[in-house]
């Protein structure tokens, strides 16, 4: 046994000596992307397995970092998404990242969702550099950082999608310019010539764009990607560039091992370590941070934000106009400045009893992460949408509407498709060819519950562009994925203090 | 923005995600029953993944559950 150990030790020394003689170095890049504040393990939609949990991921990262010199990187979209992050505007995530010792991150499009002042605060709290080479107007973001491992200089450049202004509220990006990632990278690479051995791009562009980037921009050794939530189980080589991405929500940790000789990558090997809480231990320090904010989440959800002066009816939203449906539809219309709001009753999951209203009450009423979209529809399309909305009333289907800014009557006994009778907007009979701005949620805008009218309008509005930070489309007037509807309702009730919305005959069932 | 699911075109708003494309195509139930979403290179996608113009995605059985001959 002693002899075997001696042989193994000799072999190990031999490998080390040969490696050193040839100047080879082994380094490792650990990476995550699109964490979106999912601090705790969860069961993904359609799956039976619990996955993720940042304290488990942290423990795996710690073990892997001990094996060889490593960088821990994030390819963006860290601070917004889950309630665990949103209620603290991402502060909780930055505390995690500081504790875990991230080496760098790039801003994702959702890092802008709380506005620039909040983002500046988060960047100032971060102990590691926050990158954004193609963002002009936010000086705190650095274009790149140079790290050194085993004497190898590694430049990490960060780029974010040019489409950022399309996926957040325009006010969040006022005064900022999102330059072409391709052009920006060419400039950075030129500047880094002679200063770095290896160029790593932290890309929040999406896997599709990463592949195109690798083909078009020479000099990138590695792209660590995000944005498309792609599970790249084995890194791919495109045009001499290694491309990888580690899925989403901390459900996997990306591991990329590089062998470097004379400042060049001569070998790579990568994998994803799926984070299965049943199989790994927790990092206790990180777990305590998760728990600390979890308790604060519970306290904030328990916060009383106002008072319902009457019962708010969430039980009958699939059958008739209700005061809670009216309240939510009114808030959506007001927030988006639309003429009309139409939502699906099925999106309202429960009611609220007369008395104090807590944040958790609103979250129970609106449990989904929906946001407001406003689209121009013709009077004819609105009528079609309303026809659809009452087409399955016999089944208490979720498509039954709650509305604001319009009134309509329908007959249950009429044939499906001709049940809607009188429709008025702001007290005037609807005009078939006139355009009205209609607020709804992203679910219906995408065609959920079988609504086609919004989709038809989107189809007709194929040309989108960003002009002065605003998304301009022929038919699209508002789309704010940076704020959940439930949070807008919470803010409204906080501001109003007392609510007592009436049922006022917006939806009338004609009785023979 | 136009994308394609299983070869069929879907029109969604810029900034919308994989789940919106699935809603548009009426395929969310398939996901609930265990199918997964893949890109054109066979990588699995998260439902909150960003869509891009012309992107092609596919809803299929979980490839881990299929035999090599079916892949």
Image: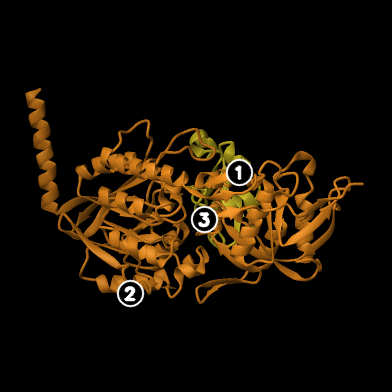
Chain colours: A orange, B yellow
CA gap, disc 1 and disc 2:
57 Å
The crowd level at tag 3 (other Cα within 10 Å; few <14, some 14-19, many 20+) is: some
Question: Eyeballing the image, is A263 above or below A53?
Answer: below
Q: Secondary structure at mark 2?
A: helix
What residue would you read off at disc 2?
A187
What residue would you read off at disc 3?
A494
| Residue A159 percent across, percent down from the top left | 38, 65
| Residue A286 percent across, percent down from the top left | 29, 42
Residue closest to the eye, A405 or B46: A405
Earlier-in-chain disc, 3 versus 1: 1
* Disc 1 and disc 2 in contact, CB within 8 angstroms: no
| Residue A311 percent across, percent down from the top left | 65, 44
Residue closest to the eye, A136 or B3: A136
Question: Eyeballing the image, is A408 above or below B47?
Answer: below
What residue would you read off at disc 1?
A352
Q: Which residue appears at 33% of the width and 38% of the height?
A: A56
The crowd level at tag 2 (other Cα within 10 Å; few <14, some 14-19, many 20+) is: few
Question: Eyeballing the image, is A491 above or below A347?
Answer: below
The quarter of the image holding the N terminus of chain A is top left
The crowd level at tag 1 (other Cα within 10 Å; few <14, some 14-19, many 20+) is: many
Write down the quadrant of residue A280 in the picture: top left
Q: Nearer the viewer, mark 1 or mark 2?
A: 1
| Residue A401 percent across, percent down from the top left | 72, 51
* Disc 3 and disc 2 in contact, CB within 8 angstroms: no
Give the chain letter at badge 2.
A
Q: Which residue appears at 21% of the width and 55% of the height?
A: A260
Q: Nearer the viewer, mark 3 or mark 2?
A: 3
* Residue A60 seen in the current view: no
Q: Secondary structure at mark 3?
A: helix
* Disc 3 and disc 1 in contact, CB within 8 angstroms: no
CA gap, disc 3 and disc 2:
48 Å
């Amino acid at each position: 046994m002693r002899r075997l150990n001696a042989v193994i030790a000799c072999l190990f020394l031999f490998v080390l000596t040969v490696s050193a003689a040839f100047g080879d170095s082994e380094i490792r890049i650990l990476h995550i992307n699109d964490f979106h504040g999912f601090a705790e393990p969860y069961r993904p939609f359609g799956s039976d397995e619990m996955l993720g949990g940042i304290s488990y991921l942290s423990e795996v990262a710690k073990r892997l970092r001990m094996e060889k010199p490593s960088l821990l990187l994030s390819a963006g979209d860290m601070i917004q998404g889950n309630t665990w992050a949103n209620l603290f505007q991402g502060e909780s995530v930055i505390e995690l990242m500081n504790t875990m010792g991230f080496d760098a991150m790039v801003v994702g499009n959702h890092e802008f969702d709380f506005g620039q002042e909040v983002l500046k605060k988060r960047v100032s709290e971060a102990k590691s550099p926050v990158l954004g080479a193609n963002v002009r107007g936010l000086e705190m973001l650095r274009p790149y950082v140079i790290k050194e491992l085993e004497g190898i200089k590694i430049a990490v450049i960060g780029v974010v999608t040019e489409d950022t202004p399309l996926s957040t509220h325009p006010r969040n990006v006022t005064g900022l310019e999102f330059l072409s990632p391709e052009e920006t990278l060419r400039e950075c690479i030129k500047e880094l010539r002679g200063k770095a051995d290896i160029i790593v791009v932290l890309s929040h562009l999406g896997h599709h764009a990463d592949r195109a980037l690798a083909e078009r921009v020479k000099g990138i050794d590695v792209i660590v990607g995000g944005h498309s939530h792609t599970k790249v189980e084995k890194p791919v080589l495109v045009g001499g560039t290694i491309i990888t991405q580690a899925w989403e929500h901390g459900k996997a940790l990306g591991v990329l091992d590089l062998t470097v000789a004379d400042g060049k990558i001569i070998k790579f090997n990568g994998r994803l370590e799926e984070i299965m809480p049943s199989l790994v231990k927790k990092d206790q320090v990180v777990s305590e941070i998760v728990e600390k904010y979890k308790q604060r989440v519970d306290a904030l959800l328990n916060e009383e934000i106002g008072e319902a002066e009457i019962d708010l009816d969430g039980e009958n939203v699939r059958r008739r106009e209700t005061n809670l449906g009216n309240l939510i539809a009114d808030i959506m219309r007001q927030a988006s400045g639309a003429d009309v709001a139409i939502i699906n009753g099925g999106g309202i999951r429960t009611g609220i009893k007369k008395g104090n209203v807590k944040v958790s009450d609103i979250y129970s009423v609106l449990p989904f992460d929906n946001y407001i979209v406003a689209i121009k529809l013709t009077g004819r399309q609105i009528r079609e949408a309303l026809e659809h909305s009452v087409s399955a009333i016999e089944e208490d289907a979720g498509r039954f509407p709650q509305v604001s800014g319009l009134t309509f009557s329908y007959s249950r006994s009429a044939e499906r498709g001709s049940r809607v009778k009188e429709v008025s907007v702001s007290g005037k009979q609807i005009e078939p060819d006139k355009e009205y701005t209609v607020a709804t949620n992203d679910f219906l805008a995408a065609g959920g519950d079988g609504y086609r009218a919004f989709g038809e309008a989107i189809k007709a509005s194929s040309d989108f562009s960003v002009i002065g930070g605003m998304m301009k489309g022929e038919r699209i007037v508002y789309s704010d994925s940076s704020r959940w509807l439930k949070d807008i309702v919470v803010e409204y009730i906080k501001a109003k203090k007392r609510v007592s919305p009436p049922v006022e005959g917006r939806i009338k069932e004609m009785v023979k | 923005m136009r994308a394609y699911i299983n070869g069929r075109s879907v029109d969604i708003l810029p900034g919308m995600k994989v789940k919106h494309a699935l809603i548009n195509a009426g395929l969310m139930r398939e996901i609930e029953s265990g199918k997964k979403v893949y890109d054109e290179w066979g990588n699995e996608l998260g439902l909150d993944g960003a869509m891009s113009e012309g992107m092609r995605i596919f809803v299929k059985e979980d490839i881990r559950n299929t035999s090599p001959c079916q892949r």
